[in-house]
Amino acid sequence: MMQTLSVDHRNHQYQLLQQRFVEQYSPIFTNDLAEKTVVVIPSLTLDQKILEALQGAQFYEERLLCLLMLLRMPRTRVVYVTSMPIDEIIIDYYLHLLPGVTGFHARQRLTLLSCYDTSLCSLTEKILARPRLIQRIKANIKGSELAHLVCFNETEYEQQLALALDIPVYGCDPALLYLGTKTGSRLIFKELNLNLPFGIENLHSEAEIASALLQLKRNNPNLQKAVIKMNDGFSGDGNAIFRFPKYVLDATNSLAMIQELLPQQTTVVAEGLDYANFIQKFQSMGGIVEEFIEGQIKESPSVQLRINPLGESEVISTHDQVLGGESGQVFLGATFPANPEYTYEIAAIGKKVADALQQQGVLGRFGIDFISVKEGNTWKHYAIEINLRKGGTTHPFLMLQFLTDGVFDWQKGTYQMPNGQTRYYFASDNVVNEKYKGLCPQDLIDIAHCNRIQYDGATQCGVTFHMIGALSQYGKLGMVCIGRSIAEAQAYFAKTIDILDQESARL
């Protein structure tokens, strides 16, 4: 059994581990020939009730398979752990994309391990419950002084796993996660004097939600909708929309009226989560209420950033997010880079936030979401939230970067490869069609090759797939469509959808 440590002792040991990462960062990340081991734990360690609304949530563990591209460095080993085994056909698909290294050479340095467990608890919890699996992971780490853990997000469970493996984590200390909650985000934005929607944070009850809604309405009598957000919601599924009644609220009893109207006027975004369960979750997590931003020309850009162990912050990418679901609250996909009219503006705001987070001790990749409204010839940007984890824009950009070895210049808003050419992409995690059910991984790969839509290393354009394992059961997969322009990338996407529709109709 694993040794149980007190919280204080565990935190102290964790800080020692992270300090070791500071010392080994430069040898690992500046030398492609350094011998190192990267342990990938793609666990969505989030509220499992909310994740139930995410179709095929277990297969989101495949999103970080883009990190198999690290095997292009000939002395790098990757240990990748999942809840259930990943089909070898899918692994072969990724290794085939590796530039400059044979699949055989890469496969010798790749270890795939599994919990053989489809239960609803997070992958990291499953690993912690299997001491022998932890020992197998440790046995594949060759020299812990040049090894680190990569996770989707970091909680106390990932901290425990890092200590069990005796390797640091390239991610945020769980003690700082409040900075990435909806409440924490708003407090940071206010501290930096950023523009953000009018709202009230640090709420914990139905009564406080009603009171905040009343304050919003009094602040803006024309307000039609407000967004209620759990502090730790994921991909919009922790949100709900409240619609103010069309009639004028009674000035003497308006709070009681809003409390009475809350269940009827609130639409929960997550499918399968009713109002009562939403409120129960909200009370346990806390959250915010803020005005719903309207606009005839409105976009939802995001900025992806990173703070390394040396305390250096950098802008990694900008995206325009494609949103759907109730009132556009659910992330569906993104184009890269963001609109040139404002990509620099949002990147500069993101850098300002990153510098503030660095002062707090934040480490790793994270994203900042905005709502941008065009007013005349200018864009007004509202800072919405900080996501202290990898997100839906992390793996597409990693895939582009690993395949093309380019650099994003955030001040110019362009991505340039060593040959001087630029590239763009359209990516989605939510390609879903009932007709696709029954298509196995080998079917998808065969369809892509026969129709010439797969990524081509010669042209450095085409389509790469992810979450391939979800296709047969859920009719769902993800795509990154790379082109010489956003229009070309979107054309690849449309063409692929047409081909999948035609091929699935033949089944």
Image: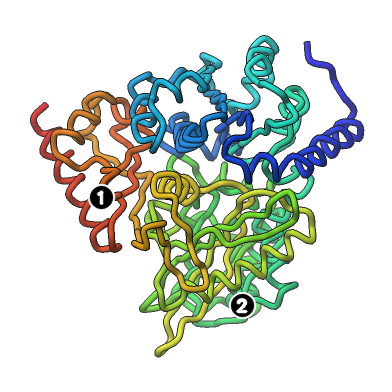
- Residue 59 against residue 262 in the figure, above or below: above
Residue 195, label in figure: 2
Please give the name of the residue rendered at 58% of the width and 76% of the height, measured from the top-left corner.
217
What's under tag 2, amino acid-wise? Asn
Task: For the residues labelled 2 and 1, say whether their Cβ atoms are less than 8 Å apart.
Answer: no
Q: Residue at position x 33%, y 21% from top?
A: 89
Residue 81 appears in view: yes
Q: How far apart, in angstroms, are the residues tagged by discs 2 and 1?
A: 42 Å
Between residues 34 and 180, which one lies in front from this camera angle? 34
- Give the number of the mark in front: 2 or 1: 1
* Percent x, y of residue 386: 62, 58
Secondary structure beneath label 2: loop
Q: Quadrant of the N terminus?
A: top right
Query: Whole-percent x and y of residue 188?
Result: 72, 66
Residue ID for mark 1: 459
Classed neighbour count for the residue bearing mark 2: other residues with Cα under 10 Å, few (<14), some (14–19), many (≥20): some
- Residue pictured at 45% horizontal, 32% vertical: 62
Residue nearest the observer in this picture, 473 or 418: 418
In the visual, does 84 lie left or right of 430?
Answer: right
The amino acid beneath tag 1 is Thr
Q: Quadrant of residue 127?
A: top right
